Image: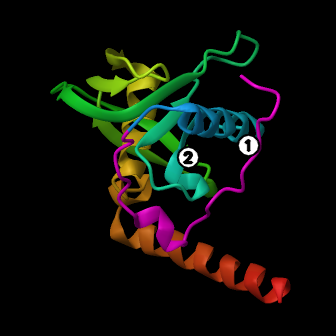
């Protein structure tokens, strides 16, 4: 982690950027590592436990997360080009939130355990078997890379309400910025 880390502004619903499908990272180089560091800095500042590059406007298949509890030593994880290669039949429900949809939470059902293949910040291929919060967080962030938001798992009625609320808030923000 360098000293020159930068906190990036978060993309907030209803920004259409959040619906973009991110492209694979071709090479893991200093720029990608710097991006990962900036993302970690942004995530910790928010504060959040996961962040996909698209949430700061970079459509690359890169995500960071840290599911350690408050007071525990930080364990930042970087996943480049992650993909779920196995999902359990068993499901679990977590109340999820999202840094791009501030102060809104909803229960989402997902596979309870998954296996994810990815490339680490050194460019090495890795695989992780995850369950619990880590599995939920990985699935939530990988969804971002595919233009999917956690509100896509809730009823259309609730989703439309959330989108309307954020669209209205964005117009208010926009009007003030002029």
Residue displayed at 33% across by 16% down: 126
Res 138 visible = yes
Quadrant where the N terminus is found in the figure:
top right
Residue 7 colored in magenta in the image: yes
Quadrant where the C terminus is found in the figure:
bottom right
Instruction: Magenta stretch: give its range.
Output: 1-26
Q: Earlier in the sequence, mark 2 or mark 1?
A: 1
List x then y, in percent, for residue 152.
36, 59
Among the 4 quarters of the image, the one containing residue 80: top left
Compared with 52, 74 (above or below) is above
Res 113 visible = no
Residue 121 colored in magenta in the image: no
- What kind of element bears circle 2? strand
The reply, left or right, for residue 15 in relation to residue 23 is right
List x then y, in percent, for residue 35.
60, 40
Label placed on residue 46: 1
- What kind of element bears circle 1? loop
| Residue that numbered label 2 is attached to | 97
Residue displayed at 53% across by 69% down: 162
Among the 4 quarters of the image, the one containing residue 171: bottom right
Compared with 70, 163 (above or below) is below
160 and 172: which is toward the camera:
172
Q: Residues within 10 Å of mark 2 (few under 14, many from 20)?
A: some
15 and 24: which is toward the camera:
24
């Amino acid at each position: 982690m360098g000293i020159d880390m930068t906190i990036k502004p978060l993309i907030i619903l209803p920004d259409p950027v959040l619906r973009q499908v991110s492209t694979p990272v071709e090479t893991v180089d200093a720029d990608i590592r710097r991006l990962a560091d900036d993302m970690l800095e942004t995530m910790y500042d928010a504060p959040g436990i996961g962040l996909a590059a698209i949430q700061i406007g970079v459509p690359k298949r890169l995500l960071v997360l840290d599911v350690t509890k408050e007071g525990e030593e930080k364990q930042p994880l970087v996943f480049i080009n992650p993909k779920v290669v196995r999902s359990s039949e068993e499901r679990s429900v977590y109340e999820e939130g999202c840094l791009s949809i501030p102060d809104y939470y909803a229960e989402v059902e997902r596979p309870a355990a998954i296996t994810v293949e990815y490339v680490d910040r050194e460019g090495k291929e890795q695989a992780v078997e995850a369950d619990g919060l880590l599995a939920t967080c990985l699935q939530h962030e990988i969804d971002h890379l595919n233009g999917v938001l956690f509100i896509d798992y809730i009823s259309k009625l609730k989703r439309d309400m959330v989108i309307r609320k954020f669209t209205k808030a964005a117009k208010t923000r926009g009007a003030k910025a002029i």
